Image (cartoon, rainbow, N blue to C red):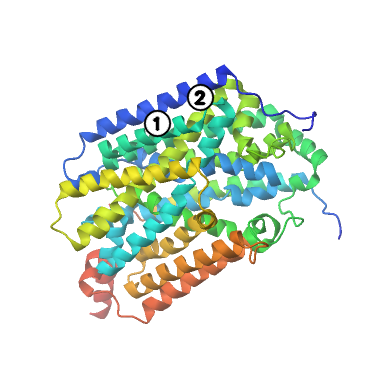
Amino acid sequence: MNAKFLNIPVPTAGMALGAVIGVACLLTVAVLLGALAKKQWKSFDEYLVGKRDIGPWVTGLALTGSYISGWAFCGSTAVVYAVGFSGMWFAGIWTLVGIIPTVWLAATKTRDFAQKLGAATITETIGRRFESKGLQTLIAVCMLFFLFMYSVGQLKAAGTVWYAVTGLPAIWCLLIAVIIAWLFLILGGYMGTQWFIAVKGGFLGLVGAVLGVWALIWAGGFGSISQALMAQKPNLMALMDPTLPKVGMTQLFSSLVGILATPVIFFTMSVGFPHNVSRFLGMKKLTRKEFILLCFVVWLTAGIPVMLDCSSNGLVARMIFGTNLLANKQWGADLSAPMLAWAVGGTGLLSVYLTGLVGAALGTLSAMVFIMSANVTRDIIKLWAPKTSDKSMLYLGYFLIALFLFLPFYFTLKRPPALLAVFMGLAAMGLGAIFVFVTVVSYYWKRATKVGAILTVIYGTAATLFGGWAVLGRKPPLLGMGTMEWILIGGCFILYFGGSFISKPPSEALIQKLFPARANARSAKAA
Amino acid sequence: MQPTVVDPSVAWTVWALLILGTFLMTLIGTWLIVRRWEK
């Protein structure tokens, strides 16, 4: 430990009490919202999608809330703390390059397609868009696989930070949190999830902005940060650090191939994540003013807070703690964001931050778990056995939600199997690369066919598994993470468009229904 | 290998341009969409 810098504080009763009160308030709000949302649905369809009447404020905040996971809120600061400015490319400086196009490209189209096709889930929307029950089933299985892998690590940051900060075992905090999540998911369904995630999104935006601006002022501004870090190690202020390995994850900080891949990763992840796009399923038909408001809400809550979180916060944490956090073998850089909150704002800001982190993890996990449960009930069972009663589907859904919440909880306490841990690292990239084409491009390109979509799903899944091994599993790594993103996205692009061009186009009836303006323009031209 | 020469002002300038650039992207992109909004 270097005595020039601050060290991790020993947890005090005040820290533990503040964290317990903060998380208790958050969970109380979650249950209340779930109970309120219970009155909003009467059928299985309404449980899955609400009444399609949600306005721009709730939708915008829910999109922010579903996108900003525990990793985005906490892990991004840790990356920059560990490697310096060059880490910001991967840590989320491109968040707006992903999340704003998600609103532009997916908001109104998801709502319109789902309503026209009578679909209650994203998977069902895609299945009906391509007129294929087989594709719907394949997508449900693929989504389940990727979301499961991605969900496994969701509670880790919250559990780690909780223990480090309060000194209390994470098991009770996380167990109560997942039970509460189960309650609001089964009580409130889509509406309950949407409301909780929206509250969380607004809270995270506020906490992120306050901590970011506060830390910059506390540090004495850009000049002081630069001076302090240049004295530690000049490469901390470099935009690219060529001294880091050019294979594995560090390629994203050390080479142009890696850095140029980062905006593509953030764009495809945000636009392709099913739990992001699902936020628009229950949205009302927006007016022009409401669409502008939706864009503004997302920019305000996901823009500046995340940009500071993933750049200046990590630098200020490094300025305050030096390498002392890295010297801690148990938690390492994961503690940079909460420790920054403690150093600049004391116990009060630390409690608020920890509450936000638990909320971030729980909200994103809830959004994913709700989709995973519907993947089985609505997208597979109800698809092939339509006479199955809605009541049976609801009860099965309640059980699956409990199961899918329990597994991440279990793997937070117990280390996940090595193979699962390796694939988890690339699950987000794979999910984004596949579904940016299969979902959003299919809204705009009427010539897209189920053959193109099936090839994309199969290739994307196989490439992600290969990438997990080649980038994260193999020692030393075979490829850099940026190279892997180009392989993933390039292959999906070729197969999606190539597969669609060589196969029979969708039926004229479907095109008339989903793309009326373009179909009419074509008829007029022909006449 | 030549030691890397680091100028912090370059890093902060790029950082500021990213924040400004994404703000302008949001503004211009949204405007382009809403000007063709169906009544």
Q: Quick check: A410 above or below A122?
A: above
**Mark sitting earlier along the chain (1/2):** 2
In the image, residue A191 lies at what x, y percent? Answer: 28, 40
Q: Chain of mark 1?
A: A
Circle 1 packing at 10 Å, graded few (<14), some (14-19), many (20+), is few
**Circle 2 residue:** A19
Circle 2 packing at 10 Å, graded few (<14), some (14-19), many (20+), is many
Q: Residue at x 58, y 43 (%)?
A: A75
- Identified by mark 1, the residue type is Ile
In the picture provided, is A380 more to the left or to the right than B3? Answer: left
On-image quarter of the N terminus of chain A: top right
In-front residue for pair A18/A421: A421
Furthest residue to the bottom?
A502
In the image, residue A122 lies at what x, y percent? Answer: 31, 56
SS at circle 2: helix
In the picture provided, is B11 more to the left or to the right than A211? Answer: right
- Identified by mark 2, the residue type is Ala
In-front residue for pair A186/B15: A186
**Mark toward the viewer: 1 or 2:** 1
Q: Chain of mark 2?
A: A
In the image, residue A261 lies at what x, y percent? Answer: 59, 61
Which labelled disc corresponds to residue A176?
Answer: 1
